[in-house]
Image: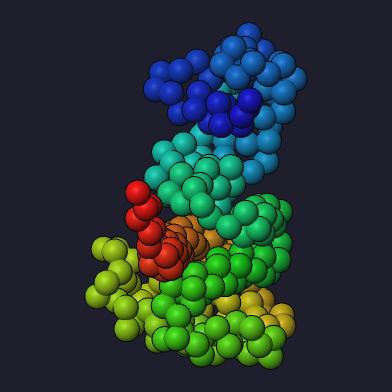
Amino acid sequence: MDVRRHTIELLATPRGDTRFGSSYLPADIVARSGCRLHEAHAALWGLLAEGIAYLDPGQQGPDNWHWRLTEVGLLAASGGTWEPRDPDGFLRRLRTRAPDVDPAALVYLDEALRAFNARCYLSSSVMLGVAAEQVFIGLARAVVAAVGARAMKLGTALDNPRSSQNTRFDELRKVLESDRATLPQGLADPLTLDAVTDLLRVTRNDAGHPSGVQIDEDTARTHLAVAGGYLAKMTELRNHFEAIASQAAASQAATAVPPTRPSGP
């Protein structure tokens, strides 16, 4: 029962009755979502607090005031952008595009979105950096398993706790550069890795400790807006290399099976 999502959809419905009174929009939310009336009211006031909706007092009598979507709310309703003020929609879009995204990364990303909406912008960027790092490690491990000796330095960097993130990124970039011609269309863009590297550098220094840099709202919003697509693409890259590793393991297992001797008369 996603009361919030149903509420946004009803607010975005052309010529829908969005009047304030309990028998109008709140009743429609109850009918669509199956929630209780007080939960419908709570969802509406929650959207107002988030800057997704507002009350238009243009009509006489409070019951006839209309709930309306703000510009941010319209973006959230369209589902076409990575809108951090719609955390549920943001995460839903990422799961749709990359169903296999790392579960731990999703936990940190959810925290990053909630911190952003609580106006804790530095906390948001730090949590986003952790999420990006988690997805990066999954990709790097998949590359090591798929290409073997060519990724030896990358594997060593991953296993060495003293290795910096810059070293790990540089080693992964070298492997991806050499394999770019064989990567699926849309996954060979080096800007993806560069963008994630920059994201981590904003919030962490080379040793992986917090840098203390100040993050304003616009910067935090930009980080989140671009991160969704990058995290999805890195997950797709990880899946690509995991498939290669699985195929190689299956082929090796098949060749290791001794031939069956013909049975005697």
Q: Which one is nearer the viewer's eye here, 39 or 2?
A: 2
User: Is residue 173 at least partly visible in the picture?
Assistant: no
The residue sitting at 65% across, 58% down in the picture is: 104
Q: Measured along the vertical axis of the image, is residue 79 above or below residue 235?
A: above
Q: Measured along the vertical axis of the image, is residue 151 above or below residue 26?
A: below
Residue sitting at the far right: 38
Q: Which one is nearer the viewer's eye here, 85 or 150?
A: 150
Q: Measured along the vertical axis of the image, is residue 130 above or below residue 236?
A: below
User: Is residue 101 at least partly visible in the picture?
Assistant: yes
In screen coordinates, is 220 left or right of 210? left
Quadrant in the picture for residue 38: top right
The residue sitting at 43% across, 23% down in the picture is: 13
x, y percent for residue 80: 39, 45
Q: Which one is nearer the viewer's eye here, 192 or 256?
A: 256
Q: Which one is nearer the viewer's eye here, 170 or 118?
A: 170
In screen coordinates, is 245 left or right of 215? left
The residue sitting at 67% across, 41% down in the picture is: 49
In screen coordinates, is 10 left or right of 264? right
x, y percent for residue 45: 68, 32
Residue sitting at the far top: 23
The residue sitting at 52% across, 43% down in the picture is: 92
x, y percent for residue 124: 66, 63
